[in-house]
Amino acid sequence: MPKDYDPSMHSAEHILNQTMVRMYNCGRCVNAHIEKKKSRIDYKFNREISPEEISEIEKRVNEIINQNLPVREEFISREEAESRYNLSKLPEDAGDRIRIIHIGDYDSCPCSGVHVKSTAEIGKFKIISSSYSNNLLRLRFKLGKDS
């Protein structure tokens, strides 16, 4: 596990992914670099997004965080996981039981990372910049104290 790995940031990534899926039907990220201080995430996308859209993404992610949703794990058979989820990002040796992380009823995703127990532990989500190139939208974000 990387030195700067942060369960809050990783859980926020899951919420951001589901928010992007719901708002833009773009699918989950194709690449992510998650660290404690700041993180970045890339989506297959067809354009840059506006400052108003960035504000709306932040608003929706923070609404989910503020709901104090439970974050829990579940283990299901590989066969069931293959029928319900994209397993392409899991290592080949993930085994016959696949770990699914649930964030309330908002998001469910196969994952081997460490997470918070509740979204209330995450803090305030803020997109610090975005860029668009070659059909990839990159969002850079951080977490702060909710004041």
Image (spheres, grey):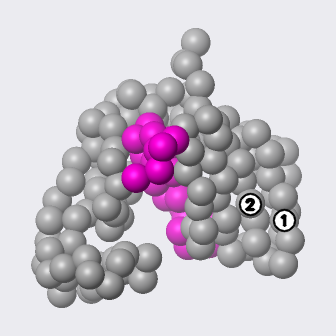
| Amino acid type at image mark 2 | Arg
Q: Nearer the viewer, residue 52 or 15?
A: 15
Lateral position of residue 106 relative to residue 144, left or right = left
In the image, residue 135 sits, relative to residue 19, either above or below, namely below
Q: Percent x, y for residue 56?
A: 69, 43
* Relative to 11, 114 lies left or right: left
- In which quarter of the view is residue 92 placed? bottom left
Question: The C terminus lies in which quarter of the figure?
Answer: top right
* Residue shown at the point (74%, 60%) measured from the top left: 138
Residue 119, picture quadrant = top left
Q: Nearer the viewer, residue 123 or 49?
A: 123
SS class, disc 1: strand
Q: Is residue 22 magenta?
A: yes
Question: Which SS class for mark 2?
Answer: strand
- Left or right side of 131 for 123: left
| Mark 1 residue crowding within 10 angstroms, few (<14) / some (14–19) / many (20+) | some
* Circles 2, 1 touching at the beta carbon (< 8 Å): yes
Q: Nearer the viewer, residue 76 or 66?
A: 76
Circle 2 Cα neighbour tier, 10 Å, few/some/many (<14 / 14–19 / ≥20): many
Asked if residue 119 is among those painted magenta in the image, a careful observer would answer: no
Tell me if residue 77 can be seen: yes
Magenta-colored span: 1-28
- Provide the residue designation for mark 1: 132
Which kind of residue does numbered mark 1 sit on?
Tyr
Q: Which mark is residue 138?
A: 2
